[in-house]
Amino acid sequence: MKQSNDLILRTTTQIIAFMLLGFSVYLFFAGHNAPGGGFIGGLMTSAAIILMYMTYGFEKIEKIIPINFRTLTVTGLLIAVLAGMGSMLFGASFLSHADGYYHLPLIGEKHLATALIFDLGVYLVVVGITLTIILSIATDSEDESNQNVGV
Amino acid sequence: MNNLAILPIILPLLASVIVAFIPSKLNIVRKLSQALMVIFLIIVGYIAWLVYHNGVIVTQGGGWDAPFGISIVADYLSILLVLTTYIIATAAVFYAPHSLSDQQEKFYFYTFYFLLISGVSGAFLTGDLFNLFVFFEVLLMASYGLIVLGNGKAQLRESLKYVLVNLFSSMLFVTTIAFIYSLVGTVNMAHIAERVEAIPAEQQGIITGIGVLLFFVFAVKAAIFPLYYWLPNSYVVPNPVISALFGALLTKIGIYSIFRVYTLIFVHDTAFTHQQLFIWLAIFTMLFGVIGALSTNNVKLIVTYNIIPAIGFILMGIGLYSEDGLAGSVYYLMHDMVVKAALFFLIGALVVAAGTKDLSKMSGVIQRFPLLGWLFFLGTIVLAGVPPFSGFIGKLLLLRGALSQEYFLLTIVALLSSLLILLSMIRIFIRGFWGEKMEGMTNDNRKVHALTIPAVFLLAISIFLGVGAEYVLPYVDTISTYLLDRTEYISAVLKG
């Protein structure tokens, strides 16, 4: 992106992206008791990242977030599958989950569940897939050097 | 709690994730996929052995008992088909490196391949109608990925049609499930079967209506007349190994689903659904499919068209709804999966050997590649049902069933279409393999040889099915009595 007069976009992005990321974390943890979860949280995070891409340009964000989003997707899938299989080690049925109430320092009494691990997998998959798709479309061109970007 | 029933679904899923980490390290990915697949095949074989010795294995997902949780049911029919799937998949994973280009393999072929197996196994094993829809989507997603692999112009065109047709039928599928849920208040298949029985006779018309709607959905997937129009072109465009997986597995999922719901749930009005609708559709499917196979000179398209009459044969057995009919259908289903995969493999090898798909430009291939030629001939007579091979046993059971219920037209059409199948395939042998040695044959003998080996493995299994019918038939008979008596399935799922 060439230098252009997008002061309003840059200023609001600083605030909005921060809010989006914060809210996505909240949604992620709200997941299994209230509306939210890995899917919505992941979409929210990718929305924030895409907003940053739009504002600051492709190269800059790629330097700041040096993650291969396809590997991120696969990592998420692995976490989700292993979370499902984990219960089989304890002789329980596939996808069985355990939960309990724990007292954590600073935060206080919290309800924790192993379903959160599964949700983390979903979260990573959603972020990875959304960004892969959008970046593939965004960087698509007739140019030979870009042929390997699209899946 | 027994987790064995779910292993055929999650093992390939895990494998698909593992190979996705290193898509471009082809040597590792190939060896790893092959090793994993052989291990999985052994595990699934062991599970099948357990099922036949100790009875149906049911896994309740997440520990929630049926009908509230999702049941995964490894019963005699489903585990047998899963085992067949794994046998084909094992052959395919050894075929793939020689058939696909490196570039295609790097674009996540093995990931999609394992996902496809996971979805197919899931569709076979699930005991829940909504979950069946989910697994349909899983395998369709994988197949969308596979059909465009290679990025050809024709592939992109056909994949668009393929996606649209499947989206439409998936949409109808969910609608139908909603109808069923509103009527009986459950989506667990065993539970639906139990509740449908309780519906008074004068209101059973609506069940039949829903049943036919569901049949329509599965008929699109299974390519039954008149809904097969999408199949030939979209199955012919991808690489042979992908065509083999599609031809051997995907349409069979559709026909298996018809099998499942029409022996378990919708059995109250067999006079209409089975004996009229299915029998007539089976007749047309056999006829039109085989006419398609005779109409073309593209060798791959000939084999692709031959998928359709096979579906007709299987549907015919379901329509008969007798012990012989169902046994014949199960046998034919198994036989057809194996031999179709083998034939697609051989056609792939033939196209490489001759350098063309056009039959009219081929001749004398057998002079350079005798093994390929004779294997193809063997595959042809196995497919057409020449005794003592497996096609014959299946057709014998089906025809015996049809004659004992006095369906003479059906018998004649079935015999006629068998003959025409033989004609359509032997045409390739006569014109492609015999005759003057053609110009332009490949010099890459090793590649053709490597492409032939997996087909040998599948044909050996196929021949065992036929010659060793004495060992196989008792199992098939168990399945047909088991299907006719629904109580074992229902009690295994609901009270197990």
Image (cartoon, rainbow, N blue to C red):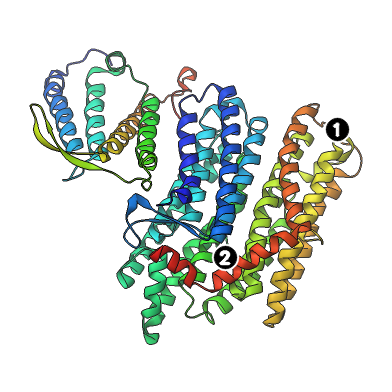
**For the residue carrying disc 2, how many other residues have a C-alpha within 10 Å: few (<14), some (14-19), or many (20+)?**
few
Q: Nearer the viewer, residue B310 or B89?
A: B89
Give the vertical position of B353 relative to B7 (above or below): above
Q: Nearer the viewer, residue A39 or B127?
A: B127
- Residue B154 place in picture, x, y as percent: 58, 40
Q: Secondary structure at mark 1?
A: loop
Give the vertical position of B404 relative to B113 (above or below): below
- Position of B257 with respect to B1 (left or right) is right
Q: Chain of mark 1?
A: B
Q: Residue at x 15, y 34 (%)?
A: A26
Total tally of numbered discs in the picture:
2
- Tell if the residue under mark 2 belongs to the same chain as the one under mark 1: yes
Q: Residue at x 64, y 68 (%)?
A: B477
Q: Is residue B164 visible?
A: no
Q: Nearer the viewer, residue B178 or B37?
A: B37
| Label 2 to label 1: alpha-carbon separation | 41 Å
- Position of B107 with respect to B191 (left or right) is right
Q: Quadrant of residue B184?
A: bottom left
Q: Chain of mark 2?
A: B
Q: Residue at x 33, y 52 (%)?
A: B63
Which kind of residue does numbered mark 1 sit on?
Glu
Which kind of residue does numbered mark 2 sit on?
Pro
Give the vertical position of B36 relative to B216 (above or below): above
Q: Which residue corresponds to mark 2?
A: B226
Q: Residue furthest bottom?
A: B202
- Residue A46 place in picture, x, y as percent: 26, 30
Q: Which residue corresponds to mark 1?
A: B439
> Which quadrant is the N terminus of chain A positioned in?
top left
- Residue A51 place in picture, x, y as percent: 22, 26
